[in-house]
Image (tube, coloured by chain):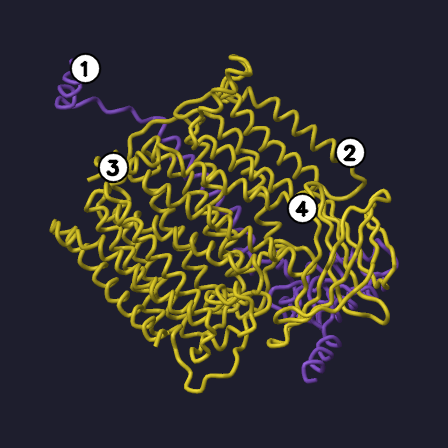
Amino acid sequence: MLAEIGHLAVIVAFMVAIIQSVVPMIGAAKGYSGWMDAAAPAAVVQFLAVLLAFIMLTIAFVTSDFSVKLVASNSHSLKPMLYKVSGVWGNHEGSMLLWILILAFYGALVSIFGKRLPLVLKARVLSVQAMIGVAFLAFLLFTSNPFERLIFPPIDGNDLNPLLQDPGLAFHPPFLYLGYVGLSMTFSFAVAALIQGSVDAAWARWVRPWALLAWITLTIGIALGSWWAYYELGWGGWWFWDPVENASFMPWLIAVALLHSAIVVEKRETLKSWTVLLAILGFSFSLIGTFIVRSGVITSVHAFANDPERGVFILVILVIAIGGALTLYAMRANSFRSNVVFSPVSRESGLILNNLLLVVSTIVVFVGTIWPLLAELVMGRKLSVGAPFFELAFTPFMIILALALPVGAILPWKRAQLSRSGKPLFGAIILSITLGLLVWSLQTGGRMMAPIGLGLAGWVILGTLTDLIVRTRMLQLGFIAGLIRLCKLPRADWGKAFAHIGLGLTIFGIAAITAWESEDIRIAKVGERFEVSGYTFQFDDIKKINGKNYTADVGNISVFFDGRLVATLKPEKRFYPVQRMPTTEAGINSTLTRDLYIALGDAQGDGWTIRTYVKPFAVWIWIGCMVMAMGGILSMSDRRLRIASTSRLKSLS
Amino acid sequence: MIRVIFILLFMSSSAWAVEPDEILPNTAQELRAREISKELRCLVCRNENIDSSNAGIAKDLRLLVRDRIIAGDDNKEVIGFITDRYGEYVLLNPRVSLSNLILWASGPLFLLLGALLSSWFIRSKKNIHPKALTEDERTRLSNLMDN
């Protein structure tokens, strides 16, 4: 019964979305305010209907209702409660429903909090948002119904893929979807702006919070995914340039570009048509990502169950959405000319360089991701494009970006003199070069990664701090006065500083782990001691344990440094009988300066295969991501964004 | 009972990325083997290199790489040896060749194109002379100033 209610709710949402996409759009064109007014309540009703469907599906999972096909094939009665709930989106149909839920949720947010949004713009935005909703609700109803029943329900379910039974992965998809779908909002605003033919600072102030929200959640989602890979896959890799990872990375890069260009529109009313284009591109890459993950045209480590019919359906949605928006763009973009003046050396130019590098690096990732597909379709050749290519082709752009960042960020708007504005950065330049040289001279042989990466990280962080010192005029006014001014800086400035420092920290973590990791692979017997990079590891014992829905061998390894016990690691090798799948849970001890990482392998004779890593500063990769996300949150909480989004919008209508 | 059999089946068949018995005694050679392994794709896996893959064929390839190194091949020759037998699909880093031109050139090309376009745009912004105020705007401005 509950599943049928859920199915019905999806149908209701589908109908409401059709009405919401047609009526307000006509109303906006003809000036019927009653028709436009229909958009807001429709968005709320659509959200409530999808929410009801989602709750019904969740109940089916939590109560292990195996007469629902999706539950039978993705859940199990013995599964821990957390994974019963996360199992709702640990599969194609359920995750699609979550996707749509978030889409409808954002629509409802605009209708509730957008009271001051000009009626015409609001009607068009909600109409475009509903069009996306119609497309994906149709996709769900006609190709991926989550509420399908089984005539003969099994006694127990098939269980969720054990790799997905993990707290990190439980929250990874919701965050990613919040990001992907957040970009649908900026897309809807962009299309609405194209239809009405005008973009101004107030429009940018409405778009920026959505771009920020999408970027923050994508950052968190990607970081969670990479952290999961780090401790779950057994050798401490944290980024694989897998097509599905790239699918989330491309919208992230475009969102970064969009955030920055929206600032230019907001402050200087130029780069308007470019910003609209980025808003369209951002969501386009979200759709491309959805296509990559769900169509199976590109082989990847973690694609969903693949079905050509679904692939074609998404391809059609993709072509209509991207094609339609870009056509509209080609027709209307010329009306966004502005007569704003700025000199080649200015913040504006710096942000243009930022956008250029981010967009070109996105293109590199995109071409690399689809190249195997193109080569096979066009030339009939089977080839691979993997991590070594991306490291070579992508990294240089990030190096240039990091080099340019502190300079661009410190330049004033409109007109600047490099010699004058850049002068305070001399300290940062000298210090970071010294840092790089110091690292280079200290390491014996080895790779250039460490000195370059550490120098870059130092440059980004010190440059950002210099910017704060200059802005607060700490050197002229004295430390205390500067500190007071620092506290009074707008939140957006804090956001900028946090985000840039976070980037520097991540670069630092990446450089350190790539250059200085040490590895040891051996067969160790219980009681054996061995040394890796100054640490003594002692294999104390190994036990069999029974988890709720798995069995495991759990090793117990004591780690000593200078004769002192510093950590006890408990790596696990689990076996999930329902899916007949082994997984590894690495034993990790993290401090700010190093991770001790042990993965347990198979029993070999009377010993066990043990892989030990000492990874210096590994944890900074993720600390950096969180600091970046924190910067986004600070920026979003800036008063100016909130005030602008309510009062100054009147100028738009 | 069935469960136990399955576990045993799995235990025996699952290999484990680089295993201790594969490691070459000569550290320099082993390091080269690791480096080469990261460039080669495990043929039955989805986008995994042979260095981190658990599949049987990955192990075979790892051993083959080490055999070639011991036989005195340099890195290029080892990769060439494997590519000759398994095709270019095995290369995670595609060859820089004419047929892969777009792949390798897309970054630099778009950077050049973008740099030209944006420098043209930035230049155009330098030379704009703000339009003079219209009569209408001038009266509005003077009204504002008076208030």
**Secondary structure of the residue carrying numbered label 2:** helix
Give the residue number, with chain letter if any, for mark 2. A441
- The quarter of the rendered structure image containing the N terminus of chain A is bottom left
Task: Say which quadrant the C terminus of chain A sits in.
Answer: top left
The residue sitting at 66% across, 55% down in the picture is A237
Q: Amino acid at mark 4?
A: Ala
**Chain colored purple:** B
Q: Is residue A203 left or right of residue A447?
A: left
Which disc, if any, is residue A618?
4
Give the x, y percent position of residue A527: 87, 60
**Chain of the residue under label 4:** A
What chain does mark 3 sit on?
A: A
Give the colour chain A carries in the figure.
yellow
Question: In terms of sequence position, does the residue under pointer 2 or pointer 4 come before the other?
Answer: 2
Mark with earlier residue (2, 3): 2
Please say if A479 is above or below A576.
Answer: above
Q: CA distance from mark 2 to mark 4?
A: 22 Å
Q: Is residue A55 above or below residue A557?
A: below
Q: Could you confirm whether marks 2 and 4 are on the same chain? A: yes
Residue at disc 4, secondary structure: loop
Q: Position of residue A35 (x, y in %)?
A: 14, 54
Nearest to the eye among marks 2 and 3: give it.
Answer: 3
Q: Residue flagged by tag 3: what amino acid is it?
A: Leu
- Name the residue beneath numbered marker 3: A649
- In the picture of the structure, the residue carrying the numbered disc 1 is B145
Query: Going by the picture, which residue comes out furthest to the bottom?
Result: A152
Q: What is the crowding at mark 2: few (fewer than 14 residues within 10 Å), some, or many (at least 20)?
A: few
Tag in front: 4 or 1: 4
